[in-house]
Amino acid sequence: MKMFDVIVLGGGPAGYTAALYCARANLKTMILEKMWPGGQMATTSQVDNYPGFNEGIDGHELSERMKLGAERFGVISEYGEVVSIEASGQPKRIKTNSAEYECKALIIATGAAPRSLNLPHEDELRGRGVAYCATCDGMFFKNKVVAVVGGGNSAVADALYLSKICKKVYLIHRRNRLNATKTYLAPLDEAENIEFIWSSQVVEPIYGDLLTGIKLENTETGAVSQLDCDGLFIAIGRRPNTDLFEGIVDIDEAGYIIADETTQTNVEGIYAVGDVRTKPLRQIITAASDGAVASKFIEDYFVQLCGRNHKVKSLRYKSEPNRFFVLTPENYEVGELNLEPTTDNTFIITHVGVDNSYNGLGIAKELVRQTVEAARQNHWKLIPRCPFAKVEYDKHPEYKDTLA
Ligand SMILES: Cc1cc2nc3c(=O)[nH]c(=O)nc-3n(C[C@H](O)[C@H](O)[C@H](O)COP(=O)(O)OP(=O)(O)OC[C@H]3O[C@@H](n4cnc5c(N)ncnc54)[C@H](O)[C@@H]3O)c2cc1C
């Protein structure tokens, strides 16, 4: 079974950012993705609000760039759908439909998926006229007539996108006004082939081999009508992909994993980032931001784990009196540290070396922490604002040899 320091579930912007940061911190990191890199981001053709791209960027291209950026630091991308998790203790075990993995820390970045309308036969009509992503499936309806259901930003963005491809677009909303942001209003007015159908809900698809139309019910009068169309795009919001985590981490009533700005869940070593967690704004930049934050807390978690398993010991050699080693309980050497005396009776940590296969970063920090602690106990003084690099010998040269 393959063992990793960190496994990230989901390869959207949150997952790839978390993976990039973890790998860059020398943690052996893998991403498990069930579909394609980029998640929801990859389904939009134009991202204008991710900084750094003055003309905007295609979501698919941004996804590829995030993937390559993470892989540059050694992130391994594997494809497979996670089907079960055993995550209460150490190591954490993850099963996909084709393999099993182990890791010390788990990042949940499974994002969200489109909500369905729960129409009769909706599932079987997916790919036969019913669609959830205009930028992914719009081209299948070139010069055809489509209906978009919804009244928020996604529905409006989909309708606008489809209006450039399709002959006619109906935008169906159960209320009599949109919930979309103002920036969409002018382009909507300009799009001559978009027609609004207000106060209406779809109640039934009409189909043969493919969808041929829909039945609509007026939400004010109850009147039922029929609309001919080749495609039905459902854009009524997203549902977090958290079914797998029920009973493993705390989840709120709407299905989001409860995690605050630290991204920590209620279970030690499990973090939730991006759209899948409770948060006020679900966007690419906030997803990426979560990924960065998670890595910081994972580093701390690894320091704790290492502290439990490793101890600093002095293995003083005559030729190297200031060399310290970190040993596993089995006395296997996994890291080392050098203290060099300087002329003014201060000592500088000149070298921290660790074996990366033993989670270098955590051990390095723990090695320094324990050595500094030992220095304190032996009356060495820390120089303020320079906690890691320098320790001052407290005018008691006799203690010089006892730091161990
Ligand atoms: C059409 C559309 C347009 C958008 N436009 C913008 C925009 O212009 N600007 C902006 O900032 N935001 C935009 N967003 C929102 C933005 O895309 C999301 O907020 C962001 O992608 C969330 O990132 P994430 O990594 O949390 O999750 P997602 O992007 O949802 O990624 C989650 C990943 O996890 C994978 N996954 C799920 N379950 C499993 C499992 N069991 N096993 C393995 N893998 C799994 C999924 O396949 C997916 O790839 C848009 C969203 C949509 C749908």
Image (spheres, helix red, strand yellow):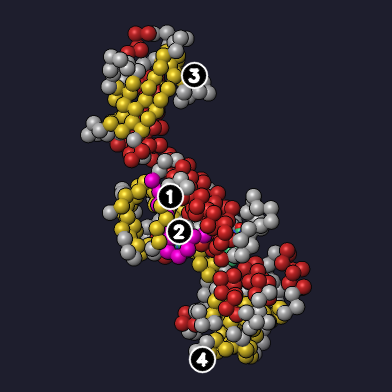
Query: For the residue carrying disc 3, how many other residues have a C-alpha within 10 Å: few (<14), some (14-19), or many (20+)?
Result: some
Which residues make up the magenta segment?
28-38
Q: CA distance from mark 2 to mark 3?
A: 44 Å
Question: Is ligand 1 less than 8 Å from the beta carbon at label 2?
Answer: yes
First of labels 4, 3 by sequence position: 4
Which one is in front in this view, the residue at disc 4 or the one at disc 1? 1
Q: Residue at x 42, y 55 (%)?
A: 77
Which amino acid does the dot numbered 2 rest on? Answer: Gly
Q: Quadrant of residue 129?
A: bottom right
State the quadrant of the C terminus.
Answer: top left
| Left or right, residue 396 beside residue 293 | left
Q: CA distance from mark 3 to mark 1?
A: 38 Å
Could you tell me if the residues under marks 2 and 4 are in contact, i.e. CB atoms within 8 Å?
Answer: no
Above/below status of 190 relative to 241: below
- Distance CA(mark 4)–CA(mark 3): 79 Å
Q: Which mark is residue 208?
A: 4
Residue wearing tag 1: 75
Q: Quadrant of the N terminus?
A: bottom left
Label 2 residue SS: loop
Label 4 SS: loop
Q: Callout 2: 10 Å neighbours few (<14), some, many (20+)?
A: many
